[in-house]
Structure formats: C-alpha cells, structure tokens
Image: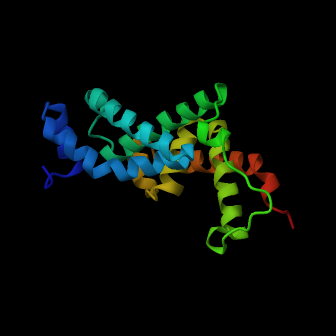
Amino acid sequence: MKSLDDKALAFALQAGEEEAFDEIVARFQGRVYAVAYRVLGNREDALDASQEVFLKVYHKIGRWKPTGGFLPWILRMTTNHSIDQLRKKRRHPHQSLEEAFVPTSEGAAVEPSTMQTDTAVRGREIEERIRAALPVLSPSQREVFLLRHYEGFPLAEIAESMGCTVGSVKVHLFRALKKLQKELRDLYEVA
C-alpha cells in the first residue's frame, strides 16, 4: 500500500480495502494534526480532532471525487471540523483542572531557560488572534487562507481541490486577508 499515490489510496478505501485506511492515517496524521493544532491551539483538542477527522474520512470516502486532490479534501475536512470545535468551545467554555490549579509561588525565581522572548510571545499572541478571527471568514475564504498560508499549497492546486478557477481562489484569498486585516488592525501600527 505504501507505494500507492494519494488518489490510488482513496480509491482503495472506496473499494473497501481496510489496509488503505491504515496507510492514509499513517501518511497524513502529521498534517491533519498540524492543521487542527493551528486552528484549536491546544494539543489535546488537536489530537481529538485528528481522530475524529480520520473517522469522518473513513465514513465519507464515498463523497470524495477524483476531480480534486485527496490531501486537500482531508485538510479541508480538518479545518472545518476544527473550526466547528472552536465554535462549540466558545459556546460552552470550560476550564481544565490543570488550568484551575496552576501552582503559584510569589517571589519565585524564573529559570532563564523558561523565560520567553518578546518575539516568541508576540508571535503566539498573533497566532492566537488569527485563530480567534478565523470564524469571521466564510468557509471558502477560510479554506483558501489555511491551505495557502499554513499548508503552502499553490493556488492552482487549491483551485483544483475546490473545483473553481485560480481567479476565484485569488478573490477568496484577497477577501479573507481584508477581513483578517480589519479584525486584527490593533496588532499593527499604521505609519
């Protein structure tokens, strides 16, 4: 099974070959986890989302069409599922036991190895703000933005996976960036 390309694996799974599913999980689990983590920002949530996405892949493989790429289809499913999880989390916020019982010791010295640079802190703040702003994008805008900026897919491949033209992808990307720029305007200084 390892010698099969992505489309052949998808066809094998559609034909009911169980080994194809194992290979799909092995081949794509890192990418699926990375996308889920970027959206959710939490290791445990990303692991849960990854498992749920692969179950969806298994159950919805009959809906996949060979006109679009198989990996973009999985990543689109991952993005949508992760954003749904993020929305549910916002509607029903909860605090984990770890968050509720963080030990504090006033006056304790901070180890130099645990100190964070301003750049790293700023980067995480921006990443968190982008993640929080993703729900303002339409599903198409969100998909194009994530596939282009986080997964590095070329515009032509995104267009193929979405079944639209490169021009449409550019429009979705432009509108996504404009919306995010508006949502995140306080993060940058206008000269």
Q: Is residue 16 left or right of residue 155?
A: left
- Residue 43 x/y as whole percent: 50, 47
- Residue 112 x/y as whole percent: 66, 74
- Residue 10 x/y as whole percent: 22, 40
Looking at the picture, does residue 165 appear above or below residue 88? below
Residue drawn at (70%, 45%) of the image: 179
Residue drawn at (54%, 46%) of the image: 42
| Residue 187 seen in the current view | yes
Residue drawn at (32%, 31%) of the image: 55
Q: Quadrant of the C terminus?
A: bottom right
| Residue 169 seen in the current view | no
Q: Nearer the viewer, residue 59 or 116?
A: 116
Q: Is residue 39 left or right of residue 95?
A: left
Residue drawn at (12%, 49%) of the image: 1
Colouring chosen for the image of the structure: rainbow
- How many discs appear? 0
Q: Pick out the residue farthest to the bottom.
A: 112
- Residue 69 x/y as whole percent: 32, 46
Q: Pick out the residue farthest to the right.
A: 191
